[in-house]
Amino acid sequence: MIRKAVIPAAGLGTRFLPATKSMPKEMLPIIDRPIIQFVIEEAIISGIEDIIIITGRGKRAIEDYFDDSPELENHLFQSEKYELLREVKDVSSLVDLHYIRQKEPKGLGDAVLKAEKHVGDEPFAVLLGDDIIKSEVPCIKQLMNLFDKYNKSIIAVEEVAKEKISDYGIIKEKEIEDSIYLIEDIIEKPSLDEAPSNVGTIGRYVLTPEIFDCIKETPQGKGNEIQLTDAIKMLMEKEDIYAYAFKGERYDAGDKFGYVKAIVDFALWRDDLKDDVRRYLEESVSKGQ
């Protein structure tokens, strides 16, 4: 049973500069909720009991957001804004969160390694803090269910456009069941010529604790960072690792276009916004904007 999740949120957010100079990219809002709240709620709904967030310098806003806010709560109560008060209190009571700081941005592998003492010797989930996935069954729960079956590390994957291949860890796969693959090779951010396929890993993993020893042995790779992909490749020498073409819609909210898509789509799903947003989009298209 998977009880613990690690959410790496220590990156510099360079794709959203200058906004992320003073705001963590994980705190950028999708209308009125920050990106990372969607990720944490996915973990909670999936049955995760213990969440470790890996933060870095300038990420204090994440801790503040999920902490109690007595002054704000009192103001909302005195103003009789009870619905807003309920939402604010719900945020601070979602789940017990733990924070570990990555002192310098040394890559995703290093960020995951920071959670080793807290995770211990049990399998755990990893959810990247800028991937939002809308699905009937939460994406990480889909992986957890498959882990119960195979008892091996398993990674969510999807097909990626050719022009995006160099942004992903790309796998060479062998299908063993519908949408389930044995990973035969994995390469971090290959060129189009180097890529063994167009199937890329996305920000959801269930990993065995043996990954920690592999990360420790992993040298710096692309970008002079310790890549989780490279550690996974090393782990493949010791045990089988699977990939799953998850069911759902992924939004890469760390990408500007992906972020805009998420805002538009989530607005169209909200009863209080959908009519106005749809009308505005139709008017914009008719004007040729």
Image: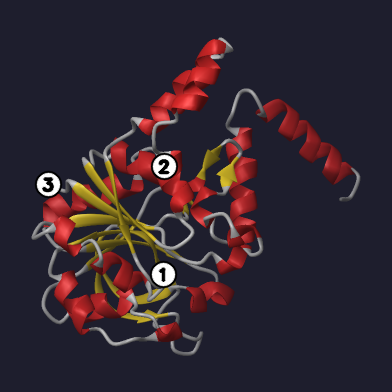
Instruction: Judge from the rendering whether residue 254 lies leftward or rightward of residue 170; answer left or right.
Output: right
Q: Residue at x 12, y 46 (%)?
A: 1
The x and y percentages for residue 85 are 49, 20
Where does label 3 land, which residue?
1
Q: Amino acid at mark 1?
A: Gly
- Indicate the quadrant where residue 185 lies: bottom left
First in sequence: mark 1 or mark 2?
A: 2
Residue 25 spot, x, y in % from top left: 53, 56
Is tag 1's residue or tag 3's residue first in the polypeptide sequence? 3
The one nearer the camera, 190 or 223, is: 223
Q: Of tags 3 and 2, which is closer to the observer? A: 3
Q: Which mark is residue 200?
A: 1
Neighbourhood count class around disc 3 (C-alpha, 10 Å): few under 14, some 14–19, many 20 upward: few
Q: How is the image coloured?
A: secondary structure
Q: Position of residue 147 (x, y in %)?
A: 17, 54
The correct choice, above or below, for 5 with respect to 173 in the image is above
Q: Position of residue 106 (x, y in %)?
A: 38, 76
Residue 135 is marked as 2
Q: Is residue 249 visible?
A: no
Whichever of callouts 3 and 2 sits on the residue coming sooner in the sequence is 3
Q: Secondary structure at mark 3?
A: loop
Q: Residue at x 55, y 75 (%)?
A: 162
